[in-house]
Each structure stands twice: as structure tokens, then as C-alpha cells.
Image: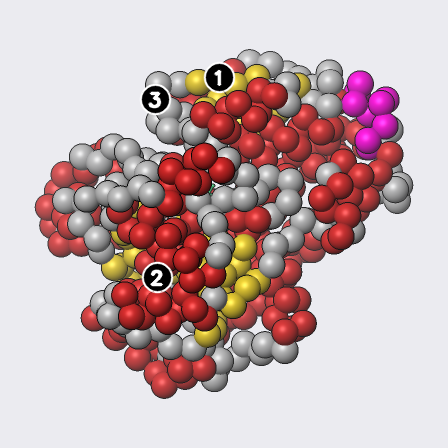
Amino acid sequence: MEIKEIVEKNELVKKISEKKEIVWINNKQVKYSEYEKNLPITDEQIKEAEDRLIRFAPFIKKAFPETEITNGIIESPLEPIFNMQKELEKKYNTKIPGKLYLKMDSHLPVAGSIKARGGVYEVLKHAEDLAIAAGMLSKNDDYSILTEEKFKKFFSGYKVQVGSTGNLGLSIGITSAALGFEVIVHMSADAKQWKKDMLRSKGVKVIEYADDYGKAVEEGRKNSDADPKSYFVDDEKSLNLFLGYTIAALRLKKQFDEKGIVIDEEHPLIVYIPCGVGGAPGGVAYGLKRIFKDNVYVFFIEPTLAPCMVLGLATGLHEKISIRDVGIYGITHADGLAVARPSGLVSELMDSLLSGEFTLDDYKLYDYLRCLNQTENKKIEPSSCAAFEGPVELLKNLESKEYIEKRIGKNIENSYQICWATGGRMVPKEDMDKFLTTYLK
Ligand SMILES: *Cc1c(COP(=O)(O)O)cnc(C)c1O
């Protein structure tokens, strides 16, 4: 079928193409016992990623002193936001049952966004592979030696490149520069100036494109492939990035344990994550499912102006459809989500796992941003704020309400709902002040 035909035949896709807010419930979702039968990523792979991050902790601790208090483990707090919960109910005339929490990846050390999980992990893995192959490092070493001059000199003979809308570039750039790599970040047009400035101040080469994220990735990949000493972090295809994000779930489980929170059938977990190309939310979702199985429900949130993942999932075309095919150009204030085409890898993985998606209009990003600041005194970036559309709409929208009634029933009253804050700590004060006073529509 032609894409045009698919759009015309599908009511939901038609609404998406009209840039209207939609709720999509995934009717392909299966029970975890079904999903588990042919997992494309093994438990061993996840364990290996977890172990690698533990090996690197002494290096992280030394290279990024802000991680001293967590002994080199890059992790963010899980905070109750009950004031925000009440305010959202009042302001949007909705019911948000259970307890609302914020997972503050917005404040992760090293890179100030969720990219401090996947991005940092992939660079560390690459560095480890190179150093071990060169006979300079063994897995039993204290990895703090990686801060020594001889390693910097060694890594300076290699290049790392990435295409980014901003935050992935920051995380790859900062980590690679700390190890001594030569780094080139290919930035799409929507990348914020301060992100480019910060990278340049760390000696990272930033190449700017007048085009969108897809173009930045394509050019970066081409540039890197032509250079045998260069490694390309491929956000559209990388399994290593994905593995880095899955570890968030193990860490969240630990935080639940510390708080005495038990997730079971009577106490379900509902998670809302802003989605761009899909790697970050997909990795987190995959990790969460593996631990909490049928007791976790994951929803992605995208802007109506860049709804690439929901378009790929709802049409079944995955990465073969771009929002441009339905006349949307990804010009959104949610710069971290300004992506035209989803990752094929992630889209396939989410096909029978995800509960659904919500999309939201740009003006709401700033309304939620202000609301969080006023009620909880927390500041996160606009892209991050997309997450709040989830709890606001869950029981307001008839389709998601029906889904919850069918799947969760009255246990929704005992639920834990988590909005995943994906970025914000590094936003300069002037930019944040501007966000706080931005009113759209
Ligand atoms: C990257 C990013 C996301 C989404 O991650 P993807 O892997 O692109 O889906 C969400 N929010 C912020 C702030 C980000 O930087």
C-alpha cells in the first residue's frame, strides 16, 4: 500500500497528519510471558552492560567529581511530586490516582539528561574495547588509571562522531573529551546555541547543519565511515546505546526497594517517557518490562509537531515512514524530540511491549514547566515536560481510560505513576528564565 493510501484509510493517522493531539492504545501489546519467548536482547547482555558501568565507576568518579557522592555511579533521584499532582488535577480538571513521582534524569551528573545513560555507556564501551585490544587495560584493573596521560594520548589517536539534536552530542562530547578522544558532533538546526558553545569550550568540534536531525546523522555517519580511526555513535541503530538506557530500570528497582515500594498486580507502575528517535525511552521501557513484567505500563509522549514513533507504530511501517510523508516537518519547541523518523530497532522492540502513546501541543510544554517550578521548585527543559501529558490525559481520554479499566481496574488507585524527566540541569539560567515566561498559542 502507498503511504498516501495508508494515511487516508487510517483515522488516527489522519488526525496525526492534521497535527491534532491523539491518544494511541497499542492493540498489539502482548502478555510478558508471550513477549519473553523471543527476546532479542538477552539478560546476559544487560548484565554485561551493568558490570561494565561498575568497572568504570572509579574512572567516572575521578573524571567527574560531581559523582563522588555516588562513587562514580551516574544516577538520578526519584522524587514524589504530590503538589504537582494536585495542581494538575485542579488545573486540567482530571483525576490522577495513586502516587505521582518524577524520575529526575534531568539532573543526571555528567550530561544533565537521560543521554548520560546511553551516550556515556557507549563511549565507555568503545574506549574499553580499544584499550583492551591494545593490551593497555584488563577488566580487573582499577579503571581510574584511564585518567592517566598515556591513555589520553592513546585515545587522542581515535575519533568519535555523533549526530544530535543537542543532548546526545553533549553526553558523547563530554565523555569522549574526558577520555581524550577527538570528537566531532554533527548538530541539527534545532540544537540550542548554549549546547554548541559548551561543547566547543571542551575542545569538541561542532559542525552545524541547516537541516534536521536525520541529515546530521546521515552526514556524521558518512564522515565517520570514511575514516578507519573514527567511531560513529548511531542513535538510529545502536544496540549499545540502548543497553545503556536499560540499566535505568535496575537502578529504579533499587530505589523502590529503598523506599519500601513494591510493584505488583495490586500496585501497578505506570511510566510516561518523552520520545524522540526512541533509543532512550525504548531502552528504559525494555528494562522496566524485564523487571516488572505485566505490572508495568509504559507510555511514550511526543509533540504533535514531531510524532515519529507513534506514526511508525500505528501504521506498522516503523522507520519506513517519516513525519514528512504526512506533511509534518518536526519544527517543535521540544528540541530533544525533534525527530522525523523513529529508530527501526526500537520501534520493532516496542511493537508488542508499549501500552500506547500520547501527543501534545507545544504550548503545554511551557505550562507544565511553570507548574512544576511553582509547585515543586524543580526546573526541567521543555522536551522533558512532555511527560506530564500522560497522567493528565490517562483518565480524561476515553480510550486510555477504557484501557486502564480493562487492564488495571480499581488497582489504579494504588498505582505509582512516574513522569520521566529527561533533561534540564545544564540549561543556562537565562534560557530557563525565558522558558518560564514563554506563552504560546
Ligand atoms: C534525547 C531526549 C529524549 C528522547 O530520547 P530519544 O532516544 O531521542 O527518543 C527526550 N528528552 C530529552 C530532553 C532528550 O534529550
Displayed-image quarter of ligand 1: top left
Circle 3 sits in a helix, a strand or a loop, which is it?
A: loop
Q: Give the residue furthest to the right.
A: 141
C-alpha span from label 2 to label 3? 30 Å
Q: Are marks 2 and 3 in contact (CB under 8 Å)?
A: no
Query: Which is nearer the eye, 379 or 395?
Result: 379
Q: In this view, does 17 lie to the left or right of 381?
A: left
Residue 314 location (% of width, % of height): 27, 52
Residue at the disc numbered 1: 207
* Depicted 218 relative to depicted 408: above or below: above
Quadrant of the image containing the C terminus: top left
Residue 278 location (% of width, % of height): 43, 45
Q: In this view, does 214 lie to the left or right of 142?
A: left
Query: Which is nearer the eye, 31 or 140?
Result: 140
Residue at the disc numbered 3: 211
Circle 1 sits in a helix, a strand or a loop, which is it?
A: strand
Main SS category, magenta section: helix
Magenta segment: 146-154
